[in-house]
Image (cartoon, rainbow, N blue to C red):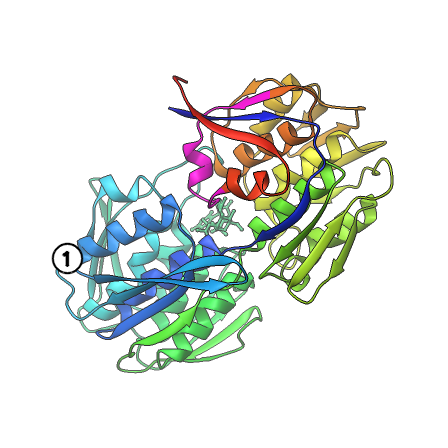
Amino acid sequence: MQKIVIEGGQPLHGRIAIGGAKNAALPLMAASLLTDGVLTLSNLPHLADITSMLNLLAQHGIGISMLGSAANGGHAGRVIGLDGGQITSTTAPYDLVRKMRASVLVLGPLVARMGEARVSLPGGCAIGTRPVDLHLKALEAMGTEITLADGYVHAVAPKGLKGAVVRFPFVSVGATENALMAATLAQGETVLENAAREPEIGDLAHCLVAMGAKIEGIGSERLVVQGVPSLHGASYSVLPDRIETGTYAIAAAVTGGDIELTGTSISLIGSVVDVLQKAGVTVTDTADGMRVARTSGRLHGVDVMTQPFPGFPTDMQAQMMVLMCTAGGAAMITETIFENRFMHVPELARMGANITVHGASALVRGVERLSGAPVMATDLRASVSLVLAGLAAEGETVVNRVYHLDRGYERLEEKLAGCGARIRRVDGSA
Ligand code: EPZ
């Protein structure tokens, strides 16, 4: 199993090109099941989760053409054609779904177009139980009959879906995406209330509109969809990854460096930039993206609470905690989205951090510096937070279970090494 070895303490300077957003790309790829035309997606990141989704779509009968790469400010985003001309299977099997929870996003498109879907229940994962009840209730409201048996969701709508008013009891990114995709082919009007407003939902909605869908309220918590009989193919470019952007912004700040992030924008991560600025980090717009620098001395602790967009993203909580570990004073970090997303805390403590967890809150008391140690984490964002901690720490840090990082960060070591980080990937037993 591969590991990442970091010699910390080096301020990072340079430019990093930000890729397309994983969490936008996955629903966009699932949307290819809605049409018998070809959906061509560009600026797709090269990540393990994207490969998992391609395998799942291929298994449903989607024809896949790799159309090369298109340069995007130094980032070579992949271009892939997804041909939904022939759906050969409406079953998403356990073996493929268990690798990635976002596989459940095929449910809405399949039932909307084919009148039937059988999708393995994704089950819990390291960061929480993560049920899919809201996805199922939304589809039921649109006339789908749902039964659960043998670990599978069986969804049927023999006469097609019907428009409905769906009010989500709380915000869910995935349930909004599944319901939105299904509603595009339902008969009549569907209203999604208390819908998620994450930029990735806007990206999906704009792509669906390019495919012929009728959607109003894009970017708001009330999406109104007029169903159409069919969608057609389209070409669409995936938006920049705001979590990759925020992660490298923290790499600059935590090492006392100065990095320009290209192919992205401050507007995607306003809530993260607010915290960075309050902590004493300089963040400015540039012609190609944004610049993040820590020019003055020690940062100040800032309290952070995760919230649905436009609030502070749960996917940046672990990384921001690392920044607070060496800031002056204390910072209270509260996680409101997932019940078990503090798995980085014991690992950071092994690197010298002073963190006390009380339920959903972690009190971080800043220490002068972290020290390198062997560490491991069980999810993507926790793993990258340990890389950030390693970059700031004195001495050597070895991050195990690198495969988590490969799910969401393309060429991580190359991008960081390009800014002066002493980081390398090595083979070895974990
Ligand atoms: C998406 O997950 C992202 N994944 C996650 O990113 C992200 O952390 C999360 O949104 C929140 O922003 C993708 O986009 C592929 P939710 P999703 O439905 O859609 C509960 C990463 O690191 N819930 O908004 O699964 C759920 O358990 C990943 O890139 C229900 O109870 O998140 C959670 O507590 C991790 N019932 C909360 O809602 C449901 O039917 C929000 O989850 C659905 C969700």
The image shows residue 265 at horizontal and vertical percentages of 64, 62
Quadrant of the snapshot with the C terminus? top left
Does residue 339 appear in the picture of this structure? no
Q: Which residue is located at x 30 percent, y 80 percent?
A: 187
In terms of image quadrants, where is residue 188? Answer: bottom left
Q: Nearer the viewer, residue 19 or 175?
A: 19
The image shows residue 178 at horizontal and vertical percentages of 38, 61
Q: Nearer the viewer, residue 287 or 151?
A: 287
Amino acid type of disc 1?
A: Ser
In terms of image quadrants, where is residue 29? Answer: bottom left
In the drawing, does residue 225 fall left or right of residue 193? left
The image shows residue 365 at horizontal and vertical percentages of 79, 27
Q: How many marks?
A: 1
In the drawing, does residue 31 fall left or right of residue 349? left
Q: Nearer the viewer, residue 74 or 64?
A: 74
Q: Which residue is located at x 55 percent, y 28 percent?
A: 343
Quadrant of the snapshot with the N terminus? top left
Q: Which residue is located at x 57 percent, y 50 percent?
A: 243
- Disc 1 residue lies near ligand 1 with CB under 8 A: no
What residue would you read off at disc 1? 89
What's the magenta region?
A: 397-411
Q: Which residue is located at x 69 percent, y 51 percent?
A: 272
In the drawing, does residue 54 fall left or right of residue 366? left
Q: Height in image: 228 above or below 157?
A: below
In the drawing, does residue 227 fall left or right of residue 60? right
Residue 426 colored in magenta in the image: no
Does residue 100 appear in the picture of this structure? yes
Q: Height in image: 81 above or below 171?
A: below
